[in-house]
Amino acid sequence: MSKNRNTGRHQAVELSFLEKVAKRLPEDVEILQALADLYTKTGKFQDGLAIDEKLSHQLPNDDLVWYNLGCSYSLTSQADQAFEALTRAVELGYSDYDWMKTDPDLNNLHADPRFESLLSWLYTACNEEE
């Protein structure tokens, strides 16, 4: 059996397990974060977006939650919402300029001039802290 097939089966089993646990513990942040991440890894972007939206209501001041929400919006071709979420992430303290610049989840935003503007703002904010 190929490695990809093994990985796919493992992810399917893990996904099934996390979905069942999330039904029993619908407010458990760690379960929801793991589920959203796995949805994204398996290409179930709408499902991941739904979880990320829920997490943004549960953890409204968490910069990483807003960053992940921005990624989910990007993956579902919702650029305006993606930029709003990413802006919120930076406002809340998100500071990984290098990752944001290369994160493949944000590829849908690269052609938009707002992306370079957001990166410039993040770069400036990161360098002011030093």
Image: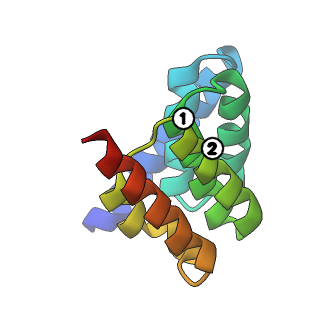
Residue 78 shows in this picture: no
Mark 1 belongs to which amino acid?
Answer: Leu
Cα separation, mark 1 vs mark 2, equals 6 Å
Asked if marks 1 and 2 touch (Cβ < 8 Å), the reply is yes
> Which quadrant of the view contains residue 100?
bottom left
Q: Can you identify the residue that label 1 sits on?
A: 92
Mark 2 belongs to which amino acid?
Answer: Arg
Colour option used: rainbow
Q: Position of residue 79 (x, y in %)?
A: 71, 68
Q: What is the crowding at mark 2: few (fewer than 14 residues within 10 Å), some, or many (at least 20)?
A: many
Q: Position of residue 7 (x, y in %)?
A: 35, 56
For the N terminus, the image quarter is bottom left
Picture residue at 39% right of the left edge, 45% below the top = 95
Looking at the rendered structure, which numbered label has been put on residue 88?
2
Looking at the rendered structure, which numbered label has been put on residue 81?
none
Q: Is residue 66 above or below residue 70?
A: above
Q: Count of labels shown? A: 2
Dot 2: element: helix
Dot 1: element: loop
Residue that protrudes farthest toward the front in the picture: 128
Residue 83 shows in this picture: yes
Q: As drawn, is 13 to the left or to the right of 46? A: left
> Which quadrant of the view contains residue 108?
bottom right
For the C terminus, the image quarter is top left
